[in-house]
Image (cartoon, rainbow, N blue to C red):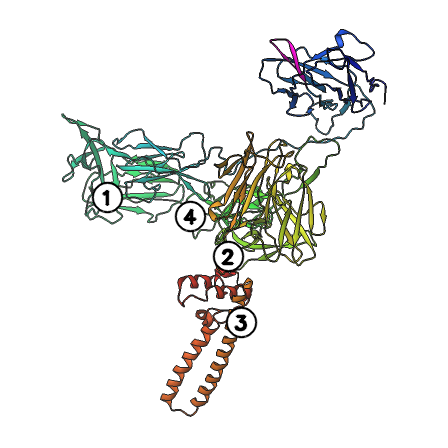
Amino acid sequence: MSDDASFIILVLSTVIHGNTEGGEVKATVTADRLTIPAGGSVTLTCEVKYSADFKYEWFREPHLNSDQKTTVAGHGVKITVTTDSTTIPAGGSVTLTCDVKYSADLKYEWFRETASETKSTTPDKSDRRVRISKGGNYTCKGWRKDINSLIAQSDPVIIQEIASKPRATLVAQSSIIPAGGSVTLSCSVEGSTGWKFDWFRLPSKPTVTLQPSWTQIYSDKPKAKLRADNTAVPVGGSVTLTCSVNPSSSSGWKYYWYRDEKSSEALTTQDAVFHSNGQISVSQEGLYRCRGGRGNPVYYTEDSQSVRIGKTGWSFYWYKAVPDLSEKSSSYELLPDGSGTAQDSYIIHGQTHTAGYVCRAGRGDPEYHTDHSQPTFVWSADVHSAASLTVSPDRVQHFTSDSVSLTCEGNFTEWRVRKFSEDGRLYSDCPAEDVYANVASVIQLRVINKTNGLKMQTRRFKVPNKPTVTLQPSWTQIYSGETVTVRCEIQGGEGAQWTYEWRAAKLNTPPTSNEYRIIRATESDSGGYSCRGRRDYFFTEWSDIITLTVSFPSKPTVTLQPSWTQIYSDETVTVRCEIQGDKPRPVLTVSPSWLSPGASVTLNCEVEHPSAGWSFYWYKAVPDLSEKSSSYELLPDGSGTAQDSYIIHGQTHTAGYVCRAGRGDPEYHTDHSQSEFVWSADVHSAASLTVSPDRVQHFTSDSVSLTCEGNFTEWRVRKFSEDGRLYSDCRRMTGSTCNINTSKSDTAVYWCESGSGEFSSAVNITVQNDGNDPILVSPVHPVTEGASVSLSCNLRTQKILSNVFFYHNDKLIQNDTRGELKISAVSKSDEGFYKCQYSGRESAQSWMSVKVIVSGADSSSSPVWLIVGLVCGVSLIIILLLLLYRCRRTNSAANEQTLNQDEDQQHVYSSLLHGDRCVYETVRRCENTENGPAEGDYTNVTSVIQLKVINKTRQRGDPEESSDYNDVNPNSATALKS
């Protein structure tokens, strides 16, 4: 030991002078040791064998002077220094508190001493509670202010300071890498040499996402809000309605609209004009309301308040348009009962030929009238006797630059030809020669002659429409390796000999066809496709572009586990390279994650780009310990379902499931999904998992043992962590026991898998990361109904606590001096989340499950039921023998009977056969014997027999018994899926 790290303590005899009966009284100094270790301390005790109240003076060699004397009054007061931590992190600080149980007003003095520095006061630290940022041995003294007397001095508290690690400095020659070039990086540690450098390329910053991506969700249903920009529909116009859900920051809502109170069907595009999400325009009067919905399954808000939309105070006038060739316009004749109607609609019955109509509106007193509307026509293709229109050549479709003659015929001298084009324009006259252009075609019209006539028949002319590009199958999003056919279709061009021109140009392989088949699509097949048709010198327009997207293998991703990019020496980290396959991987979800008695399990399989045409395949994951993976067994009726969900009934223990999807012909399959699990907390008879110590919550660095039990030689312990990762093995597996030195990342669900494919019950393990917070001591496995259970609260440094608060589902249930919560007879109502609180600090909450025992369910554990079973078995055998004997006698007698006797005998035999069918009701339902046996009927005979014993006292036809039989009926889809 160095001289500056220790010194020899000289034990001095101090003589205390006083007026005592024995003359001088001698004080003796004792030390617990004679050397001070580096950074340590020694305790000195001054003992005086005398009963009077003394004060003490202490001296230290080799310099005895008044400055080194400390006078301590003998008040018997103890001072304790407490701290929130004994180590100061780099750049941090800790808080020291001087606790003195003394009622007088005190002032405080703090001292700091290190191995290299002598004890010194800290003049800026005079409060009872101080915050320090340097390490050392700290003591405090308490002085009475009124008499300036030292009350007591604390024992030293050692505070260690964690020195910060040196930081490496990275310098880049340039922040931009030139094309085909490189950049030089240099790394150095300032002030020291001899370093070896490791180089890393960091992945991008991880991103936390929500699915759905809503940061605002609801516990109680919100109510939608409906707003109208006007409550009256203007003439020829509409009213805009806006639906919203507060707060406005929430997103993802789709809105549903309803009219009138009794209507439960949402409005469609035939009822309103739908704008951006949340707005529609309506032109019909009525009582409107709305609601919002989002998610899958859809979560609906409450209906909004209703808003009534009415008509304005207009009256309406209805006219027939009469051609006026002199003015090149029309005059208007009022229709019968068409003057000032309150309704904005008018019905005409018996109309047989082409006619034009006009309306206008008026309101107020005196009445104010609007302008007349534009004429609107109703057309008839039937030839009218008074006037007709003939076309030459007599066909509907024509090519561009064709000469077409329209002739008006009838006993009239003046005519005009009118045209209503596809773009909604009305042309009032036909010049001697004119060319009309519209979107669909170009037609040249020539008036040949004018003869007498009044009214005419109208006809429409079209050339082939713009082509359309279609996909077969109709998926615009496909995956590499799939097959798709691109087809060009020309409506109205049937029967003609067309050649086709494509964009992209790579499809032009003369002679061009109207379809192109892409086999095993690749990334290069992505893009837009359009086409046009050609016949001689005539070209159609180009079709609209349809875009095909081919998904291809993604760029590899490097991940870290744990995901810390900054670690310290001796820490362990796993670097993993993940490559997404060239096939999509569906996402499987399981609901619920934890089984409850009688609940069914729903599997949902979702493909990344949902579209029609997918079939789904459902599998059960069977552990394969030799390959450290799982094999997949197809579930009953789980091959190629049209629905993306699958329901499993009667699941009782932990299991894993997988799905995949397929579509097309030949069928293209996705990869299998990741395995998803449904967990059961009930102990399974074939395999079980025990935890030592038997509690859910643990501190960091605790030693926890997970032991797999059952009649199997090979085991593995699986773990599903809080971040959704599945771990396939235990790093410290000894035989059937997995040993864990707990850390925060060990908070997870654990279960065992055997080499024979069995799953154990699952348990939750929670690791308390904050060493100052308490943990709740609660059982790992479900508690049997009627049993007693005790819950307690522990600190890392103290196992037995008092004055603990206990909460059940966040409700305070016990607050007294007891340190544990005892429930003498547990019931189902005691199930739920529990947590404890001590000195203002709360533990994490843990779920305590209660297992309900059905009366008489455990027949194998009761001698009485065993005897009943044996008696029933013997009775069944005797009845069977009697039935066989009687059946043989009946068959023998049948050979000697007349035809009528045969009918009677047949009736008897049928009765016996029916009885025979119901005798075996313990292993099959008598209603299903007509369909014949099915393969795999008796996959669990033990459970079937046990079920029969449970229902032994019930009468036939009892509804509950029928329900139990449905659970084991081998011809039932419900039974197969279990």
The location of residue 256, given as percent across then percent down, is 37, 39
- Pointer 3 residue: 870
User: Sequence-wise, which precedes: disc 2 or disc 3?
Assistant: 2
Amino acid type indicated by mark 3? Leu
The location of residue 636, given as percent across then percent down, is 53, 60
| 309, 181: nearer the viewer | 309
Q: Which residues are magenta?
A: 142-153
Amino acid type indicated by mark 4? Gln
Real-space CA distance between mark 2 and mark 3, rounded to the nearest whole angstrom: 28 Å
Amino acid type indicated by mark 1? Thr
Real-space CA distance between mark 4 and mark 2, rounded to the nearest whole angstrom: 55 Å
Q: Compared to 479, does 428 lie above or below? A: above
Q: Compared to 869, does 760 lie above or below? A: above
Q: Nearer the viewer, mark 3 or mark 1?
A: 3
Q: Compared to 54, does 928 lie above or below? A: below
Residue at image position (18%, 30%) is 362
- Pointer 4 residue: 491
Q: Which mark is residue 867?
A: none
Real-space CA distance between mark 4 and mark 1, rounded to the nearest whole angstrom: 28 Å
Of all residues, the one furthest to the right in this rendering is 2
User: Sequence-wise, which precedes: disc 4 or disc 2?
Assistant: 4
- Pointer 1 residue: 354
